[in-house]
């Protein structure tokens, strides 16, 4: 290794790289398949694509691409303020919500501090924590879900961040709003509680609560949301955090001045207004979830009941079945890196895509 790399902090050198879903184009090259024949159910993308309103907004915004975007994201923030009934000073826009998660880590973590997260939780939490030089406090899961009592009890003197994914990816598990509130009541005020609600739009109405308004009572709460999932804009990278104004101020200081591009801002404003598209996305997801889970039952496969746009199914030898599905032109997500080597995570697709997956799974299991 070259000297400069060896002198990089050991907490950087020990980071395990994030493993994204395999791109369709890559599998097509590797297997000599037509891209259009490949079914990708690997990255929790919206199978409907994007809203036509967002598409039109992007087309209109193209003419201004020679200009820098609005670094303050004024119009997008105005739309978000209206939707969530919060102040613009509470908002932090990000290059995907991944970006705002990293901003939390940058602001609150450093060597000598720690962050609490759950076993099987979203991989970005340990990544962002480690990149900031902070220690990881991993709390064993309960039935694959976050054990919030154990997480609250794991908070140490040096803990500055506690990460919660609700629903969690890749398990799809949900903790009840009441349990999150009770954790907030127990956690000391110097611990920032990050409530990552990337899949919030997929929840049934009864389980969707106004968590941004809990910030008035708990200024150490940060709620994050994204345009990558139900809004169908994963390729544009737009997400945001809602926080106490003092917290948002610190996050905005370390953010890149132009971290959300102009096409992303324009598309997000339009997507936010397209309630019909989000409702349709949820309906397609509900139907696809039923189709897949009924298929798994027929195949006698266990799965973890999921509240997201994906479901993790126990196939035994995950790596082997994954490879066999690839050969059939179906991309899913291995989750061995999440401590779940027997599982594969399957994103919910359109009806014919789900059917392809179930067929390929049947063949793979009998191969
Ligand atoms: C997909 C996902 C995100 C964010 O993705 P972005 O595209 O960066 O907004 C955040 N948290 C969880 C749990 C996710 O699954």
Image: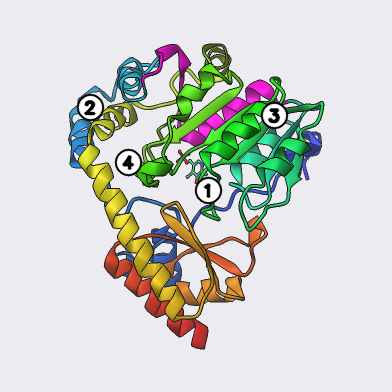
- Report the side of 158 relative to 87 (left or right): right
Pointer 2 or 4: first along the chain: 2
Q: Which residue is mark 4?
A: 231
Query: Is 86 one of the magenta-colored residues?
Result: yes
Q: Which residue is mark 3?
A: 186
Pointer 4 or 1: first along the chain: 1
Numbered disc 2: secondary structure: helix
The percent coordinates of residue 217 (x first, y second) are: 55, 18
Is residue 32 visible in this depiction of the protein?
A: no
How far separated are the C-alphas under marks 1 and 3? 20 Å
In this view, the mark in front (2 or 4) = 4
The picture quadrant where one finds residue 337 is bottom right
- Report the side of 338 relative to 10 (left or right): left
Q: Which residues are magenta?
A: 85-109
How far separated are the C-alphas under marks 2 and 4? 18 Å
CB of mark 2 near ligand 1 (< 8 Å) = no
- Which numbered circle lies on residue 61? 2
Write the residue at 55% across / 45% down.
175
How far separated are the C-alphas under marks 4 and 3? 34 Å
Write the residue at 33% across / 73% down.
355
Numbered disc 1: secondary structure: loop
Is residue 146 visible in this depiction of the protein?
A: yes
């Amino acid at each position: 290794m070259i000297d400069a790399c060896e002198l990089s902090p050991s907490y950087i050198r020990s980071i395990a790289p994030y493993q994204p879903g395999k791109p369709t184009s890559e599998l097509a090259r590797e297997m000599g398949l037509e891209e259009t024949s490949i079914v990708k159910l690997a990255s929790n993308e919206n199978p409907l694509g994007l809203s036509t309103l967002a598409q039109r907004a992007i087309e209109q915004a193209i003419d201004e691409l020679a200009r820098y975007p609005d670094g303050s994201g004024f119009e997008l923030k105005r739309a978000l303020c209206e939707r969530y009934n919060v102040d613009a000073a509470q908002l932090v826009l990000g290059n995907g919500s991944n970006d705002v998660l990293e901003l939390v880590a940058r602001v609150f973590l450093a060597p000598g501090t720690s962050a609490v997260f759950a076993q099987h939780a979203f991989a970005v939490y340990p990544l962002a924590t480690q990149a900031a030089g902070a220690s990881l406090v991993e709390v064993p899961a309960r039935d694959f879900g976050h054990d919030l009592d154990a997480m609250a009890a794991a908070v140490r003197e040096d803990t500055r961040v506690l990460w919660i994914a609700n629903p969690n990816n890749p398990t799809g598990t949900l903790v009840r709003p009441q349990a999150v509130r009770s954790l907030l009541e127990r956690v000391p005020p110097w611990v920032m509680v990050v409530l990552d609600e990337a899949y919030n739009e997929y929840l049934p109405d009864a389980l969707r609560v106004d968590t941004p308004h809990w910030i008035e009572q708990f200024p150490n709460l940060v709620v994050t949301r994204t345009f990558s999932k139900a809004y169908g804009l994963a390729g544009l990278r737009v997400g945001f955090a809602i926080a106490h104004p003092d917290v948002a101020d610190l996050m905005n200081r370390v953010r890149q001045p132009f971290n959300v591009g102009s096409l992303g801002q324009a598309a997000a404003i339009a997507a936010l207004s397209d309630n019909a598209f989000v409702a349709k996305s949820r309906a397609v997801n509900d139907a696809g979830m039923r189709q897949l889970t009924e298929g798994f039952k027929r195949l006698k496969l266990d799965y973890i009941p999921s509240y997201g746009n994906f479901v993790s199914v126990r196939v035994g030898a995950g790596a082997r079945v994954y490879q066999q599905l690839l050969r059939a032109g179906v991309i899913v997500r291995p989750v061995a890196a999440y401590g779940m080597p027997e599982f594969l995570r399957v994103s919910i697709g359109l009806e014919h895509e789900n059917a392809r997956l179930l067929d390929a799974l049947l063949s793979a299991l009998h191969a």
